[in-house]
Structure formats: structure tokens, C-alpha cells
Amino acid sequence: MTDRTLNWTSSDDAMVENAIRRGATRRELLHMLLAGGVALTASGAILGRATSAFAATPKSGGHLKAAGWSASTADTLDPAKASLSTDYVRCCALYNRLTFLDKSGVAQMELAESVESSDAKIWTVKLRSGVTFHDGKTLSSQDVVFSLMRHLDPDVGSKVNSIAKQITSVKAVDPLTVEITLANPNADLPTILSMHHFMIVQDGTTDFSKGIGTGAFKLESFEPGVKSVAVKNPNYFKSEGPYIDSFEYFAISDDNARVNALLSGDIHLAASIKPRSMKLVESQPGFVLSQTTSGNYTNLNMRLDMEPGNKADFVAGMKNLINREQIQKSVMRGLAELASDQPVSPASIYYNAELKPKTYDPEKAKFHFEKAGLVGQSVPIVASDAATSSVDMATLVQQAGAEIGMNFDVQRVPSDGYWSNYWLKAPVHFGNINPRPTPDILFSLLYSSDAPWNESQYKSKKFDSMLVEARGLLDQVKRKAIYDEMQVMISEEAGTVIPVFLSNVDALSGNLKGLEANPLGGQMGYAFAEYVWLEA
């Protein structure tokens, strides 16, 4: 009897779980265990373990409703042009990537069976066979060639054009093999291919309104800036998922309204809620919070090519006027890590731990503002609920400025249209950047001279050359040394203030299961629809 108890195996656990699924009662299960030679004292533990495993087993069915925080009439189903969280969620549902990042930040295979290279310059991609698009067409290497090469076409307007420029050629070797050649070696390519923009679309696609991909869901309807509805793809190539039958996704820009929609049962998930809403959610039974700290941040941007950011002392003054600890403790309720005005988060192996955040020093800030000739003048700061907690941050800056004779005019503008009308355009404004998996991606998107989202219009030939050099290094020690210096350059020279790295908090109903943290951000790296399920 004792030997049989000790030799109980995982396959035996599976047998019990299967019996539970068939509807066996606890008494029947006990009889089965006893007949198998398991002691009565051990049977309870085995049943508890099996029942717990069964309880965590995904359930199929149901219609999921979820709300993000940002939307625009410019919402798109073209992965190359995606820029908002709502775009990313829809693209993750409708399309697939060659690779994807797991919760530990490691690139795993998705549409690709393998991505390999001996020199980090020429890469061979082997595709899965038998994968089909929503319209029945079989995935082939030509689809990959088209999907990657279109990022290089300036007429497409790809958000990752500057990253894709390192690709010099993509050719189909055979129907399931693709060869990617880079201008210079880049050991990060498998990780880069996991970015939302590098979804694989069908060869020749020019009309993305139908959202035809290989993804877990098929598009039923889509109204830009309003909502989308997608239904389960019955021919999905993965052995598991999706579990829900359909899901509806839209944005509720106001945080209180988004939380109230969750608490009233109108939605199952309220994405990226503010810290002050957390206590309300936690006080209500049947709701839970999912926290992810993966490098998301809200930053204050001063364009270096416009007044007053073209005055170096104004930028220096602002960096000394930001009270980072107060933002961390008061604005973010402790759900943040202090940052040093550069975008690489402490979670990265390339994070420069020696670079310390600037201290709050109003007198030093006043010295710089006086040198810039701005004391007593009115300086507009554009903020919006569209950029997480930016209104609260702007208010703190305004209050601190008033104490030293600076007049900051906080212009709170609506969320609708913020990203198209103010972000990257206003002389002093806030941004909100989602996590990116490598320093190379962050620097290429935000700080290189040709970066598409160069928020402060930072230009440095030295920085650009260092970016290319680090990209191809297989020696991680040398690579980190270069990235360390680049982080210092951004902190000291760019017109961006990154006070803290935010912890993203999604609020969800208790019957929504399967949501996990992901290094690409909240909502499971925006791919939650494929992996979550609804308990009855």
C-alpha cells in the first residue's frame, strides 16, 4: 500500500482529472483510488491536487467583452501601422507572428518552426506546414516575404520602418523556407520578429478592412474608434485555444467609466486602470487585479527644435523640477519604479544600474530657468488622460514651478485625437510608451535620428553609429558597455523626462481566467484574447 502511494505518477493524476471531467462523484473517485492500492490518507491529497488542476483547466465558450483606454478614428487593422493598444489587441487576435515572447521574455516559435543563423546576418526561417489564412489560403514563404518587405516601402507608412531598414533582402527559398539578409549582424532578430508590427499578412494585401490573417479569431465587424467584434477561428493551427467563442473590444477613455463598466458587469476586463481606482476594485467581491511591470512609462517631452525646448537650460531645469519620488508614491500609489530619463527598464539585462535618477532640486531648476530667460513667462504643457497619469504629473510640475516663479499652463486636452493631434507635435507634451523587448528596438523607435517616434527630435550622429555597432555584437559584455553609454546620452542630452516605470494594472471579473504577465505589456502583451477563458 505504501509503495503504491509513493509511486503515484502524473499520468495517474491525469486519469483522475479525466474521471472528474466525465462527471465522476467524489465517492466514485475514492473507490477508484482505493482499488488502485492508494491509502485512504493519501487519496484526499491526490483528489485535492487533481481537482485543483481541473479547476484551472481552460473552459470553452462564451462572449468576452473588454475595454482598453485609447482609441481613434485612425484605428487600423494593418499591423504595420498599429500604434495604439486597441490596434495591438486586434492585430494579436487576427494575425500571428513568426515568433512571440513568453512570459519570461524568451522568443518562442509561432508561425516559424525555427529561426536560425550562424553569423547573425543571414537568417533561415522554416515555416510550419498546414497553416491557413481565414479565407482558406495556405501560408507560404511568399506571405512572409511580402509582410516583411512592405515595412521598407515608404508609401506603407510602417511604424517600424527604421527597424526594418536593417533588412536588405527577404527571399523565398522554397514554399516553407525564407532567407532574411541583414545589412549588418543583429542577434536580436528573433526577438524583433515578435513585435506586434511584424505580424504576417497575406501576400499582396492592400485592403486590411477584413483583417484576414492566420490568427485565433476571424473578424466579424470593425468600426475604427468605436469597437470590433471577432469570432473563434475553427481552423486555427494551434492545438489549444482560443477558448472563448467571440470577443468584443472597444475603448473607454475615462478611467472611472471604465472601472464602473467592469463593476456593473458590462465588461470582463478594464485595461490599465489608475492607482486611485484600485481600492474601489479590491473592495468589491468577485473582481481581481493583474499587475505587470515591464517597462511602460509616461514621459514629458520637450521638442529640442521648438521654443522653449531649443534652450538647453529649459530642458535641464525641467529635469531638476520633476519630483520623481512624489510621482512614484503619490501619483502612482507606489506602483512604479524610479527611472533616470532613459527607456531601458530595470527588467532588462542591459539596464544601466549606475545611472541614477536626478534629484528634485527646485533651486537648481530655477537657476537654469533664469539662464533660459523663462522665469515669469507662461509655458504651456499639454496633457491628457490618453497618456497615463500625465494630468497628475503635469499638476505636480505646475505646483513646483509656482514656488520658484515659473508659470506652467497645463492644457488638458481630450483623449480622443490626442495621439494624432498633440503627441510628437506640441512643444511640451506627454507621451506614453509601451514596453519593447530590447534596447535596440527602443532606441530605433524613439531616439535615433530617423526614429519615427522621436518625441524630442533628438539627433546625434555618435548615438546613431553606436546603435549600429551594438546591434551586431555577439559579445554581450561589449554590447552592454555601449548600451550603458547610450542610456547616459539619452538621459543627459535628449528632451525627454522619464520619471518612473509604471506598473500596469488590469482589472478583471473573477470569472475571467488565464491572464498572465508578459514583457510586451498589459493585457498579456495585448494577446490575451487567445489565451483567456470564462468560468461559468
Image (tube, rainbow, N blue to C red):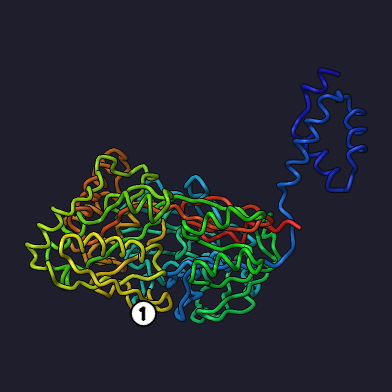
Task: Out of 300 and 93, give the one closest to the viewer.
Answer: 300
Res 98 visible: no
Q: Is residue 381 above or below residue 282?
A: below
Task: Out of 393 and 63, give the one closest to the viewer.
Answer: 393
Q: Is residue 365 left or right of residue 7?
A: left
x, y (%) of residue 489?
19, 52
Q: Is residue 333 above or below residue 204?
A: above
> From the image, which quarter does the N terminus lie in?
top right
Indicate the secondary structure of the residue bearing disc 1: loop
Q: Residue at x 56, y 64 (%)?
A: 259
> From the image, which quarter does the C terminus lie in?
bottom right
Q: Residue at x 62, y 60 (%)?
A: 530
- Could you say which quadrant of the image residue 397 lies in? bottom left
Q: Residue at x 39, y 62 (%)?
A: 389
- Could you say which quadrant of the image residue 433 lies in? bottom left
Q: Is residue 27 left or right of residue 108?
A: right
Q: Which residue is mark 1?
A: 155
Instruction: Count neighbours of disc 1 (C-alpha within 10 A) and say few if under 14, some if 14 to 19, many if 20 or more.
Output: few
x, y (%) of residue 183?
30, 59
x, y (%) of residue 313?
11, 61
Q: Is residue 167 above or below residue 475?
A: below
The tally of labels here is 1
Point out the residue furthest to the top here. 2
Q: Is residue 271 left or right of residue 34?
A: left
Under mark 1, the amino acid is: Asp
Q: Is residue 335 left or right of residue 350?
A: right
Res 477 visible: yes
Task: Out of 67 and 447, give the one closest to the viewer.
Answer: 67
x, y (%) of residue 117?
42, 48
